[in-house]
Amino acid sequence: MASANVKQPKSNLNKGLYCIIWRWHFYAGLLCIPLIITLAISGGIYLFKPQIDSWIDAPYQNLAVTAKRSTANQQINAALMALPGSRFSSYQLPEHAQQAVVVHLLYHGRRMLVYVNPYNLQVLKKIDYEDQFIRMVRTFHGELLAGDVGSVIVELAACWAIVLILTGLYLWWPRSSRTLAGVVYPRLRQGRRVFWRDLHAVIAIWISSMVLFLLITGLPWTLVWGSAFKELRQWNVPIVKQDWTLSRAEENTNTVKMSVARPNLSETLLARSMVLNVAPPALLSVSRKDSNIWKLKSRHQNRPLRIEAWLNGETGEIIRKESFNERPVIDRVIGIGVAAHEGQLFGWFNQLLGVITALGLVLMSISGFVLWQRRKPVGSLGAPPLLPNVRVGKIVVMITLLLAAVLPLLAISILVILLVEWFVLKRIEPSRKWLGLQTS
């Protein structure tokens, strides 16, 4: 994000700080670029989850009404018979009469979706919940299909991406009077080097706020930071359960606890649930505490539209109802952030902003890579050089301590890098030259 036209600070302290921040920006870029491109593309695809799901489920959205509609219990039994030994988890309310009913089951520890024709009870489709295309995209985006290890890698990349943006803003910040060229729009007629540098810096500055927003709103779902945040939230809101999970294992645990062998979903309860017009997809499941109480929960991506209701299993009478606005403030803030992160808070324009940000990240990463290749000396990593005899240790320590308080995983990685650089790489002459650690 730095521009060569920016006038360098005059004092040794400022020069030293500038060079250190430039090095951190450089290293952050090397660490992040492959993952940034990966996460930008997978996140860009996930923005269109509603459209993708609708396209995949199109064959089950226009069923012929050929006979009297079967009862919910008959549909559930048909699904259970299709997977012998399975247990009922939840019943997804159909949005219209021609739509297949989706029954969620627990089968040998796996979450399964069974599509049932409500008129002839034919099982139209059986699929593992994790094998859905958009679910695989989400899993790849969150953990690179590598479980907890992948989740930590993604979180580490997100932390370093925050460093990348913040250090880039410092390097980009104009330090002398100059035109807007190269600052807010790229110069196109001053050679390839200037073009690539300006493209990198200008794209980054335009999307930096959106990138930071996406990174920050994604942190509550991460394994390390999210777990610490969950503990802090539980300390402040001990009674109300957190409505987001941190891993697939946690999701599966919740599913196991909610599953039952043979539910009794009465037609009265189903009719009362349909009348509530809960934002789809809406799931009916048996309450953990009382088998005669059912829980109706919206799983709409626009979380402010979500509602939870507990109903009497026989009469359908509403026992308790909770809207998004009744949840703790901290949950509402996280919910709004996540809805915007997934592109579902304010319709198509939210998706458009997400696509622009994803494309900008890809272009920013490619231009940064091109800049590195063009300026990198042969036989060297091409890291910005350190200035000799300039002490900025206290400033770096203060920044590291601040990061340790806010992003512990990042602080740990910085400490590991510093220890390796100091005790290993600095003591090996070829590595000193390759890393640009020679200061004289």
Image (cartoon, helix red, strand yellow):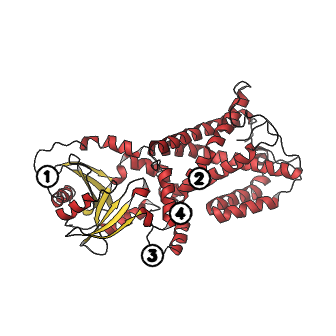
Q: Which of marks 1 and 2 is in front?
A: 1
Residue 226's label in the rendered image is: 4
- Looking at marks 4 and 1 on the same chain, the residue that comes earlier in the sequence is marked by 1
Say which amino acid is labelled 2.
Ala
Say which amino acid is labelled 3.
Ile
Q: From mark 2 to mark 4, how far is it between C-alphas?
A: 13 Å
Q: Are marks 1 and 3 in contact (CB under 8 Å)?
A: no
The front one of 217 and 362 is: 217
Q: From mark 4 to mark 3, how far is it between C-alphas?
A: 19 Å
- Looking at marks 2 and 3 on the same chain, the residue that comes earlier in the sequence is marked by 2
Secondary structure of the residue carrying tag 2 is helix
- Give the quarter of the image for residue 415: bottom right
Residue shown at 40% from the left, 50% from the top: 135
Characterize the local packing of mark 3: few (<14), some (14-19) or many (20 or more) Cα atoms within 10 angstroms.
few
Q: From mark 2 to mark 3, how far is it between C-alphas?
A: 31 Å
Residue 69's label in the rendered image is: 1
Residue shown at 55% from the left, 71% from the top: 232
Q: Are marks 2 and 3 in contact (CB under 8 Å)?
A: no
For residue 240, side relative to residue 431 (left or right): left
Secondary structure of the residue carrying tag 4 is helix
Work out which quarter of the rendered image holds the N terminus and state it: top right
For residue 108, side relative to residue 24 (left or right): left
- Looking at marks 1 and 3 on the same chain, the residue that comes earlier in the sequence is marked by 1
> Where in the figure is residue 339, as x and y percent of width and height?
47, 53
Q: Are marks 2 and 4 in contact (CB under 8 Å)?
A: no
Rendered position, 365 above or below 71: above
> Where in the figure is residue 308, as x and y percent of width and height?
35, 64
Secondary structure of the residue carrying tag 3 is loop
For residue 143, side relative to residue 189 (left or right): left
For residue 113, side relative to residue 301 (left or right): left
> Where in the figure is residue 313, as x and y percent of width and height?
22, 69
